[in-house]
């Protein structure tokens, strides 16, 4: 395929995906709703999904690392949004917050000391005994400091807070400090990158299938901690009211100049304010995506990017050329996880709440991987295209299933067994459709819609 043909083909694919989003907002024909509100909601989630897909593409497309713990890093990004953008809980630090920090430092020091002792002592019973002694003593010291402090923090107004809170010092008007949420996005990337460094140090030496199992297990551990440690972010009781960098709809509706402008557009204030807020989110998310995409492209075309692909294609030859494969794998693992953390912080900002039970690793990790595979592994633009296309399908498949059910059961008694089963069909069609789409792409375009050059 010539370069001109490739450009024309890729341009056609981008225009088709753009047309799908435009049709959702501009027409109510067939499965389309004709609502720009719906289109913008879909677009915002697609932008976040594209960033996740870009992160996974760095790991798999550049380096061949099979990471199925995506949701763990996304959850850490969401946690960062709460820890940075929410106000501190009054009295929490004095009641036990500092003691919790001390307990965590004690736990970390125990692990570091264990590693140092094992590195410096010769193998034998003495090293084994020292290791066991340090871990046991450190564990009991950690629990003696940590547990009482957690109890005191979680006892502070548990119906509405019961956690340490965040770093937003805006007081009662903390929501006016929406810019703190934007700061939380790169912080979410840093938190995910730190976790990736720890995970990579222990898991990247594993073979690809074992690496997948390890990352999935660690992802489940991260989400389990977030669900059960109420002092951190209220656990399953959720954190709501996360500040956002765009205006609130009620404020726009109470602004006479905005109401006047909405009337000029032919829109009622409620609809206009909702659309305006979603456009604001879209601009923020698109700006971050463009910056990250440019950086990913620069990395891909740099000597470092060529080295990463050489390691991916022939690891043995790369080692023979003197390349530190493990170190390079750790670098790319950290970078890809950081992008997932940024996307996770954006997702909590868009939702306005942190809900740990919504992070379902097997379900949504599968969806991000479908985006990368369908779009084109190894091609950053392909991963982004896959993010937009697969998210559109994920949203629109349910109304498509309901339409199929309506057509196939036309004229039947609503109580007919077939009509009843088909009425339930739409809600269960998503995962089936994702699997079929991936199989079709792998059969007819195994390198994705936008293959790596």
Image (cartoon, rainbow, N blue to C red):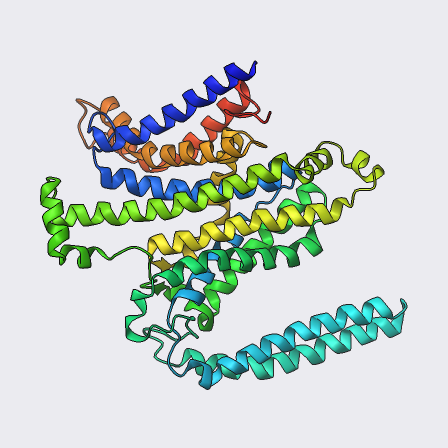
Q: Where residue 291 sits: x, y (%)? A: 48, 44
Outermost residue, front side: 257
| 419 w.r.t. 39: above or below | above
- Counting the numbered discs, the total is 0
Who is closer to the viewer here, 102 or 31? 102
User: In the rendered view, does 218 fall on the left or right side of 371?
Assistant: right
| 340 w.r.t. 81: above or below | above
Any part of residue 429 in sight: no
Q: Where residue 340 sits: x, y (%)? A: 51, 49
Q: Quadrant of residue 308?
A: top right
| 444 w.r.t. 40: above or below | above
Q: Quadrant of the N terminus?
A: top right
Give the residue drawn at x 41%, y 35%.
388
Who is closer to the viewer here, 224 or 413? 224
Who is closer to the viewer here, 56 or 4? 4
Q: Quadrant of the C terminus?
A: top right
Q: Where residue 293 sits: x, y (%)? A: 50, 40
Outermost residue, bottom side: 94
User: In the rendered view, does 19 fall on the left or right side of 343?
Assistant: left
Any part of residue 173 in sight: yes
Q: Where residue 328 sits: x, y (%)? A: 71, 46
Give the residue drawn at x 45%, y 85%.
95
Q: Quadrant of residue 309?
A: top right
Give the residue drawn at x 77%, y 78%.
133
Give the residue drawn at x 43%, y 61%.
81
């Amino acid at each position: 395929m010539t370069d001109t043909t490739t450009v024309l083909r890729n341009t056609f694919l981008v225009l088709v995906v753009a047309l799908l989003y435009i049709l959702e907002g501009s027409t109510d024909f067939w499965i389309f709703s004709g609502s720009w509100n719906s289109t913008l909601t879909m677009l915002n989630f697609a932008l976040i999904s594209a960033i996740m897909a870009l992160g996974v593409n760095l790991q798999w497309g550049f380096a061949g690392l099979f990471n199925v713990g995506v949701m763990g890093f996304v959850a850490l990004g969401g946690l960062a949004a709460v820890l940075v953008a929410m106000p501190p809980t009054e009295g929490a630090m004095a009641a036990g917050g500092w003691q919790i920090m001390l307990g965590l430092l004690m736990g970390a020091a125990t692990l570091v000391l264990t590693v140092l002792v094992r590195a410096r002592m010769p193998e034998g019973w003495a090293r084994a005994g020292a290791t066991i002694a340090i871990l046991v003593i450190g564990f009991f010291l950690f629990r003696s400091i940590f547990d009482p402090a957690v109890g005191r923090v979680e006892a502070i107004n548990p119906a509405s807070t019961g956690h340490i809170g965040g770093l937003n010092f805006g007081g009662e008007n903390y929501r006016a400090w929406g810019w703190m949420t934007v700061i939380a996005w790169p912080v979410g990337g840093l938190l995910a990158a730190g976790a990736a460094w720890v995970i990579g140090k222990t898991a990247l030496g594993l073979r690809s299938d074992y690496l997948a199992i390890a990352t999935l297990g660690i992802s489940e551990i991260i989400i389990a901690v977030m669900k059960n440690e109420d002092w951190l972010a209220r656990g399953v009781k959720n954190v709501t009211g996360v500040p956002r960098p765009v205006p609130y709809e009620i404020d726009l509706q109470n602004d006479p100049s905005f109401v006047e402008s909405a009337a000029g557009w032919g829109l009622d204030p409620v609809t206009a304010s909702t659309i305006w807020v979603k456009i604001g989110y879209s601009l923020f998310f698109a700006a971050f995506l463009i910056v990250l995409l440019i950086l990913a492209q620069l990395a891909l075309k740099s000597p470092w990017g060529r080295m990463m692909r050489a390691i991916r294609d022939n690891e043995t030859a790369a080692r023979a050329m003197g390349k530190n494969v493990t170190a390079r794998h750790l670098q790319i693992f950290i970078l890809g996880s950081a992008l997932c953390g940024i996307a996770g912080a954006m997702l909590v900002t868009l939702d306005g709440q942190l809900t740990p039970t919504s992070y379902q690793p097997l379900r949504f990790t599968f969806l991000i991987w479908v985006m990368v595979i369908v779009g084109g592994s190894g091609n950053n633009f392909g991963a982004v295209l896959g993010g937009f296309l697969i998210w559109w399908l994920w949203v629109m498949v349910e109304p498509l299933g309901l339409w199929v059910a309506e057509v196939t059961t036309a004229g039947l008694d609503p109580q007919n067994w077939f009509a009843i089963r088909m009425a339930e069909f739409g809600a269960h069609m998503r995962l089936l459709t994702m699997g079929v789409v991936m199989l079709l792409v792998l059969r007819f375009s195994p390198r994705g819609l936008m293959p790596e050059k």
